[in-house]
Image: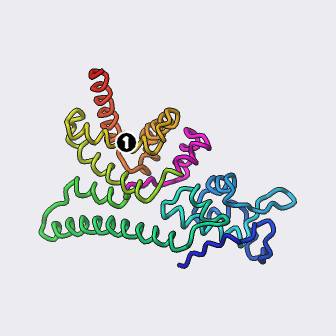
Amino acid sequence: MTLRLDPEMPKPASSTLARPQFPDGAADIARRFGVSIKALRLYEEIGLLNPVRDARGWRSYGLAECTRLLQITTLRELGLPLAQIGKLLGPGGQELEAVLDLHERTLVEQRLKVNAALALVRQVKAGIARGEAATVDQLAGIVRQSRAGRIDWTDRIGDLAETVFSPDQQRRLQDSITAESELDWAEFYDALAVVAAKGEPESAEALALGRRGLMLIKRMTGNDPALWRASESFWSKGLADADTAASLPITPEAWAFFRSVVGALRRSSSEGD
C-alpha cells in the first residue's frame, strides 16, 4: 500500500470531493476502520480530523476525512505519537521517505518477533511429534509471543482507560508509544513472567528487573505522579477483572509479583537513606 502524505490536502469542510459515496457517521466509520468512536473524537479534538457537521449537528465523514483517517491509523500502527503525526500531516511536514524508513524498521522488528514465535511453535510441534507433552511454560510462551507485549484494546479496556485517565493523560500516554517502546515493554513482560515464576521478589535478578520496569514507567509517564498513580490504577483494576485481564499482556500473578519487587526496592532505598 502506498501512503501519500499531502500537506496541501484541502480541509474536509471545504472539500470538493464527491461526498455521496461516503455519507457515514462516526459509528459506521469507526466500525469500518476498526477504531473506536473515542479515538475519532480524540483525533478531532487535537485537530487531526475535521468532520463536517450537517444541519442537525451530526458528524459526517467524507472521502477526504476517510483518507486522513487512513493516514492517521497507518502512522499510529508504525508507533508514531499523535504530536508527530500532526506534524507529518500538516503544512511543511516531513518527506514520505522518512516515514517509509520508520515503516521499514518497524517491519524488521515485527519480523523478528514473528520468527521468535514461529520457532517456539515449531519447537512444541516437534516435541509432540516425538511423543513429548508440551510444558506449561512453552504454552504460556506462545501466548506471550502472540500478544507481543500489546494490550488488546477492547471496548471494556477503553472504558476502563477513560475512567482512570483524563483526556490529557490519554493523549500523553499515546504520544509516548513508539515502535521501540512497544518492543521494550514486550521484552519486559516476557522477562517478568520468567522471573515471577521463581517467586523471589528480593533476588538480585528480580530487583534488577524491577528497576528496569520503573525506568519504563518513568519514561512513559514523564515521571508525573498523577499519571503514575492513574497507570497503577489502570493495571490494578484491569487485572482484578477476569474479562479485562484477558486483554492485558501480563497475568495478575505477575503484576502482584512486580508490586512486591517495587516494594522491596523502596524498602531498600529507605534503609539506605
Secondary structure beneath dot 1 equals helix
Q: In the rendered structure, which segment of residues is drawn in magenta?
A: 149-174
Which quarter of the figure has residue 196?
A: top left
**97 to the left or right of 272:** right
**145 to the left or right of 130:** right
Per the image, the residue denoted by label 1 is 215
Quadrant where the C terminus sits is: top left
For the stretch drawn in magenta, what is the main secondary structure? helix
In magenta segment, residue 169: yes
Name the spot of residue 90 as percent of width and height, x first.
66, 64
Residue at 63 percent of width and 52 percent of height: 38
Name the spot of residue 166 as percent of width and height, x first.
60, 40
Vertical placement of residue 186 versus 78, above or below: above
Residue at 85 percent of width and 57 percent of height: 56
Which quarter of the figure has residue 40?
A: bottom right
Name the spot of residue 173 as percent of width and height, x first.
52, 47
**44 to the left or right of 237:** right
